[in-house]
Image (spheres, grey):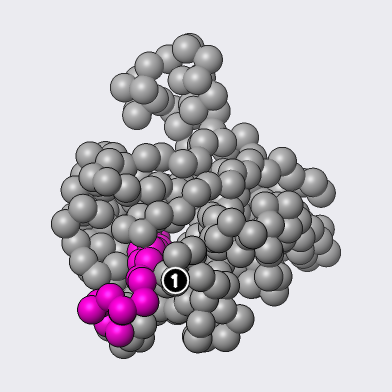
Amino acid sequence: MTGKPAGGGSEMRLKWAGATDPGLVRLQNQDAMYADPGLFVVADGLGAPGNGDVASGLAVRAMASRSPDSTGALVAAVEHANRVVHTRSVKQAELSGMGTTLCAMAVFDTDDGHRIGLVNVGDSRAYRHQDGRLELLTVDHTRVAEMVRYGMITPAEALDHKDRNTLTRAIGVAAAVEVDDWLLDISGGDRYLLCSDGVTAELSDDEIAEILATQFPAADAASALVRTANEKGGKDNSTALVVDVQITHAGDDGQDEAQQEPAPASGRGDDAGSGAAGAKTGRRRWFSSRRARG
């Protein structure tokens, strides 16, 4: 596989890994994730047992059927996923009311090199760890998050608020959905995390930053995030998808290593891979609750 030059004779490659677990309380894992050299998705299903996993699985498959090459196309892919989930919930009475969060990241080729597109609906999150600093890239669509933004309550009060899990947006619950989107610059050494709220409900941002700063390769970081969420209570399903950005230059001693493909991480709830950004070939990985450790 080859990727588009990042400029100056350099090439950008991605290495990624994901881990998911039902946690210590819930019997079913309703999270799903998808990873491809140019598209990464995490979804957290909502609804009665047996419904949420259908919604998250439908959403990631719908996203995987598209190849977005711009933020507009990425938003359109999310809108397509919303229609797919909503249509199924309307047609099948037993699935009525199902929905899912969705957080996705795509790598675009532009005239100026590669850029990152990001979209979000719900309270799954995207973070970037860059130069030793963790940055939350998305906005939670929850009632409590809105109350914090408007100064009605403090972040500390939000932690135990009765409405902390009440979503204001979700995929599939209505015929249309509002999607947040961002276009970001990308740098070598960036590490991105997409995760469900089973991770962020148990780990503070400082704890997430510590794991992302110290656990390598990506498979170790993803596994550590999910394992730590369980160690701290595991009250919900937890999913972590970690994407590392590597930029290599012609003649660099580390170029060959950067292009090696690692073996998949062990465990039914784990996955790892690598690929050139923008490549249309490579191993596609889709993991739903049915493939997670249960």
Outermost residue, top side: 152
Q: Which residues are magenta?
A: 237-257
Query: Can the viewer see residue 226 in this picture?
Result: no
In the rendering, at what x and y percent does residue 238 appear?
37, 58
**In what element is the residue under mark 1?**
loop
The quadrant in which the C terminus is found is bottom left
In the rendering, at what x and y percent does residue 174 appear?
77, 46
Q: Nearer the viewer, residue 220 or 21?
A: 220
> Is the residue 61 above or below the residue 114 in the image?
below
Q: Which residue is under mark 1?
A: 9
In the rendering, at what x and y percent does residue 253 appear?
23, 79
> Is the residue 82 above or below the residue 272 in the image?
above
Residue 257 found in image quarter: bottom left
Amino acid residing under circle 1: Gly
Does residue 63 appear left or right of residue 2 in this picture? right
Residue 200 found in image quarter: top left
In the rendering, at what x and y percent does residue 287 appear?
49, 75
Question: Going 49% across and 26% down the picture, which residue do you hit?
Answer: 144
> Is the residue 37 above or below the residue 124 in the image?
below
Question: Going 34% across and 29% down the picture, which residue do you hit?
Answer: 159
Q: How many labels were placed on the picture?
A: 1
Question: Going 73% across and 52% down the picture, which residue do you hit?
Answer: 72
Query: Can the viewer see residue 280 in this picture?
Result: yes
